[in-house]
Image: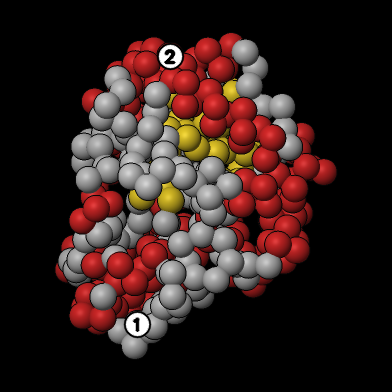
Amino acid sequence: MQSRILGRDGLRVSALGFGCMGINHSYGPPLDKAAAITLIRAAVDQGVTLFDTAEVYGPYINEEVVGEALQPRRSEVVIATKFGFRIGDAAGGVDSRPEHIRDVVEASLKRLRSDHIDLLYQHRVDPAVPIEDVAGTVKDLIQQGKVRHFGLSEAGADTIRRAHAVQKVTALQSEYSLWWREPEQSVLPTLEELGIGFVPFSPLGRGFLTGAINAATTFATGDFRNAVPRFDAANRRANFALVEALGVIAAKSNATLAQIALAWLLHQKPWIVPIPGTTKRNRLEENLGAAAFILEADDLMAIDAVLATHAVAGDRYPASGLTLIDR
């Protein structure tokens, strides 16, 4: 597995990380704990060093599983987790008050069975708390040795700049893929200017870009995609044309759709580290194969032509989720 560096402080990680959320959160029935631990350890064995979790996944359960799975290999891996949601409160919502951040970190450290968090993200920007206060709190935690690097998730360019002025931001995590390219407008140029790495989540379009989902697909009860406009039957039918067109390129290149989607992301910038997730060993191996796959110039031109002629239908979040995205 090749490695890449996130941020100017030199956080070295595998070119592809592992997004652990889907093990027990948002995508239907959770994976059995023993199976989840086996899968995570298989990823380590195959060279993955970046593992992404969050307290809200479960909640809490995901961190516990990740912590148990990685404890024997802790010195070999980078664990990223997140704060920023109010859990256990009927009103819910975001919460990045300094005292809340400190409480979350203490609890996460216990669940992760670690004395430090390698990369701590603010999960969503909290409009009620100045980002300078958030960055300052994480800076204190870094000085205390409890956190090593600071990250933001779904933050806009202005917020990134303000946070970075207080505590250097190592990485931004936001959605980015062949069917969601908005970060290219202002976020990616800002990251390049400031020397901040980028960690795309949902790099496979929440499974759609693998070709395994079509208009006839049904999702399990509790699957987040049941509420996502982009995944209603009509939009899936419209969007499948994009997948079919990309499939022609994949077949020509002797690769899978997932490998094409991930290789395309890796090609964009040398400081981009996608974090695909899966609950299946064969899909893990398929995804990791993308790290060694090189897209040729004619492949890239063909992909550009497909993207230019296939608009994606439907919002990527239900209306309530869109309100949490910082612009």
Residue type, mark 2 in image: Gly
The numbered mark at residue 214 is 1
- Which residue appears at 31% of the width and 31% of the height? 126
Q: Secondary structure at mark 2?
A: helix
Query: Which residue carries the number 2 mark?
Result: 136
Q: Residue 72 versus residue 227: which sits nearer the camera? A: 227
Q: Residue 148 versus residue 268: which sits nearer the camera? A: 148
Query: Residue 24 appears in which quarter of the rendering?
Result: bottom right
Query: Residue 183 appears in which quarter of the rendering?
Result: top left
Q: Are there few (<14), some (14-19), or many (20+) residues within 10 Å of tag 2?
A: some
- Which residue appears at 62% of the width and 46% of the height? 63
Measure how far apart labels 2 and 1 are at the Cα level. 46 Å
Residue type, mark 1 in image: Asn
Q: Secondary structure at mark 1?
A: loop
Q: Are there few (<14), some (14-19), or many (20+) residues within 10 Å of tag 1?
A: some
The numbered mark at residue 327 is none
- Which residue appears at 26% of the width and 29% of the height? 127
Q: Is any part of residue 168 visible from this angle? A: no
Specify the color scheme: secondary structure
* 115 lies above or below 48: above
Placement of the C terminus among the 4 image quadrants: top left
Considering only order in the chain, which callout, 1 or 2, is on the residue closer to the N terminus? 2
- Which residue appears at 67% of the width and 47% of the height? 64
Q: Is residue 198 left or right of residue 229?
A: right
The x, y position of residue 279, in whole percent, is 60, 67
Q: Is residue 182 left or right of residue 55?
A: left
Q: Is residue 265 left or right of residue 147?
A: left
